Amino acid sequence: MATIIPRWEWRTFNNDLAEFAETITNYGRPNIRKSEEVYILSKVRDDNTKIREDLIDIKSLQAVDENKLEQWNPTLKAGFPIGKDNLTELFKVFGVVAPEFAREEYTYEQFLSEVITPNEALKVVNVKKVRYIYSVNDCIVEFAETEFNGVPWKTACVEHVDPANVIKTVQELGLVGLENINYIKAMKKTVGLV
């Protein structure tokens, strides 16, 4: 299994990114990805928990540097049907007391309707993304059009294993001065879970 080297990330959510969207096209043709995902937000914690293509993928914040760049690391991946052991671990990530599980394992639909939706400390957010992904200074640079439960947002992101390279690229792309905010915090503001 390959060693995962966590990347440092700078991200902003702002519906006035027209200048950046135009500037980034000078760096070549993007790789375009469209997806529909379900995020599960916890009132207690800010881990990144999403479901895409029947796979729960959790990333936890590992570090924040002096420039407020964030380093996220995968902590759990599980497919459906999902068993009690993985659900117990998942609720530890949520920082919420796990309910009594009535089943040995849950399908995707059962998981959302029987385990997540009844819990007042958790919220399901339906997310749509169209991501335009570029390479600038060896960084992954993304411009994306997103929706959180139907509310539109544009986002820009710069990622690399070297935080100095991230800062250099943020400056080069004219993004300095915009709020650095991750997906989870932006989502919580949008859906009123702050």
Image (spheres, rainbow, N blue to C red):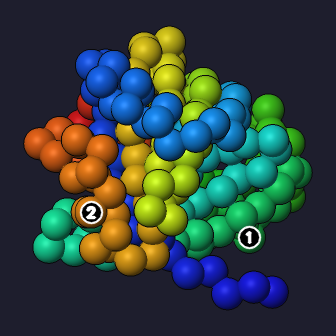
- Residues packed near mark 2 inside 10 Å, few (<14), some (14 to 19) or many (20 plus): few
Q: Nearer the viewer, residue 107 or 102?
A: 107
Secondary structure beneath label 2: helix
| SS class, disc 1 | helix
Closer to the N terminus: mark 2 or mark 1? 1
Viewport quadrant of the N terminus: bottom right
On the picture, is 16 further left or further right than 144?
Answer: left
Instruction: From the viewer's side, name the closer residue of 45 and 163.
Output: 163
Determine which residue is flagged by label 1. Answer: 85
Q: Position of residue 131 (x, y in %)?
A: 59, 34
What residue type is disc 2 on?
Answer: Lys
Name which residue lies at 51% across and 65% down. 138
Taking the spot 50% from the left edge, 43% from the top edge, the residue there is 27
Q: Around disc 1, counting alpha carbons within 10 Å, would you say few (fewer than 14), some (14 to 19), or many (20 or more)?
A: few
Q: Residue at x 40, y 46 (%)?
A: 157
Q: Which mark is residue 57?
A: none
Q: Position of residue 71 (x, y in %)?
A: 39, 70
Quarter of image, res 5: bottom right
Q: Which mark is residue 168?
A: 2
